[in-house]
C-alpha cells in the first residue's frame, strides 16, 4: 500500500493544488478507491515519522481538505512537527479551515520557528484568519530587514487582509524599501486598507516611469491600482 500511495501522492504534490479543497476531496476518493486508505489511515500517515516528509505533508494537506474544520485540532498538533514540510502543510491547512482558536498557537510558532517557509505560511495564515492581535508582530516582521523578502511580503499582504489602518504608516515607509517585492506588497496592502495618507506617495510612484518589477508584478501598476482602490473606498463613505 505504501508504494502505491507514494506514487499517487507524489503526483498530487507535483500538481500544487494551492487550497483547492474540492480537488483534494476528488484526489482523496481516488486514493481511497485505489489503495483502500481510510480517513483514519490517512491521519495515521501524517504522524508516522517513518514516511518521507513530503508524503506526510501531502497526507496532512489531504486530511485537512477532506475533514475541514474537524481537522483543526489535529493540524494544531502537527504544525509543531520537526519536519518543516509537514509543519508548513499543517499551517496551510489551518489558513483554510482554522478558526480563532488556532491564532494563539500560530503566534507561538511564529515566535519560536526560524524556518522561512514555515514562517511565511504562518504569517499568511494569520492574515487569512483576520488575526487582529497579530498586527503588532506582523508590523515588526514587515519592518525587519533580516527577514526574507517573501516573509515580509506575506506580512504586508496579511496586514491588508486584517484591515487595521494602524499599519498604514509602516506600509507607507515600505514604499521606499530597497526590496521591490516588499514595495509591491506594501502598495497592495495600502489599497486594501484605503489609507488616504498614502495617496501622495502612491500617486508619485504610479506616475513614475520606473520599471520596478518582482517577477511579473510591477510596483508602478500596484501603486496605480492602490490609488484606484482608495478612490473607490472614498466614494463609498
Image (tube, helix red, strand yellow):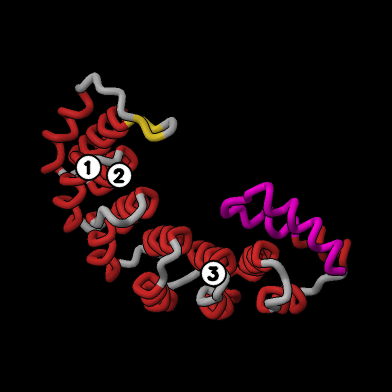
Magenta: main secondary structure equals helix
Answer whether residue 191 is visible to the viewer in this image: no
Q: What stretch is highlighted in magenta?
A: 1-27
Relative side of 188 to 207, left or right: right
Task: Report the residue at 37% width, 77% height from top.
Answer: 108
* Image x and y of residue 169, in percent: 14, 51
* Image x and y of residue 111, in percent: 34, 73
Q: Mark 1 points at which residue?
A: 177
Q: Foreground residue, 49 or 25?
A: 49
Disc 2, SS: helix
* Image x and y of residue 67, in percent: 64, 71
Task: Report the residue at 20% width, 22% height from top.
Answer: 207
Residue 151 found in image quarter: bottom left
Task: Report the residue at 68% width, 47% height from top.
Answer: 15
Relative side of 229 to 39, left or right: left
Answer whether residue 9 is visible to the viewer in this image: yes
Q: Mark 3 points at which residue?
A: 87
Instruction: Work out whether mark 2 precedes mark 1 in sequence or the reverse, and give the earlier one.
Output: 1
Q: Mark 2 points at which residue?
A: 182
Q: Does the magenta stretch include residue 149?
A: no
Label 2, label 3: how many angstroms apart (C-alpha)?
Answer: 25 Å
Disc 3, SS: helix
Residue 127 found in image quarter: bottom left
Disc 1, SS: loop
Return the residue found at the far front.
146
Amino acid at each position: 500500500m505504501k508504494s502505491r500511495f507514494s506514487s499517487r501522492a507524489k503526483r498530487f504534490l507535483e500538481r500544487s493544488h494551492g487550497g483547492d479543497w474540492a480537488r483534494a476531496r476528488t484526489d482523496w476518493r481516488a486514493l481511497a478507491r485505489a489503495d483502500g486508505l481510510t480517513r483514519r489511515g490517512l491521519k495515521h500517515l501524517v504522524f508516522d515519522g517513518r514516511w518521507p516528509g513530503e508524503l506526510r505533508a501531502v497526507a496532512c494537506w489531504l486530511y485537512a481538505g477532506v475533514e475541514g474544520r474537524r481537522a483543526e485540532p489535529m493540524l494544531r498538533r502537527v504544525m509543531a512537527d520537526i519536519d518543516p514540510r509537514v509543519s508548513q502543510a499543517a499551517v496551510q491547512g489551518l489558513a483554510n479551515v482554522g478558526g480563532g482558536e488556532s491564532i494563539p498557537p500560530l503566534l507561538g510558532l511564529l515566535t519560536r520557528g526560524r524556518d522561512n517557509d514555515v514562517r511565511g505560511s504562518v504569517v499568511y495564515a494569520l492574515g487569512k484568519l483576520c488575526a487582529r492581535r497579530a498586527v503588532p508582530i506582523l508590523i515588526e516582521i514587515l519592518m525587519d530587514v533580516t527577514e526574507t523578502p517573501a516573509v515580509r511580503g506575506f506580512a504586508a499582504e496579511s496586514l491588508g487582509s486584517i484591515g487595521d489602518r494602524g499599519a498604514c504608516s509602516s506600509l507607507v515607509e515600505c514604499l521606499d524599501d530597497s526590496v521591490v517585492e516588499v514595495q509591491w506588497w506594501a502598495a497592495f496592502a495600502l489599497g486594501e486598507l484605503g489609507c488616504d495618507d498614502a495617496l501622495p506617495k502612491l500617486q508619485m510612484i504610479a506616475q513614475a516611469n520606473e520599471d520596478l518589477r518582482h517577477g511579473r508584478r510591477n510596483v508602478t501598476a500596484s501603486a496605480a491600482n492602490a490609488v484606484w482602490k482608495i478612490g473607490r473606498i472614498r466614494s463609498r463613505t
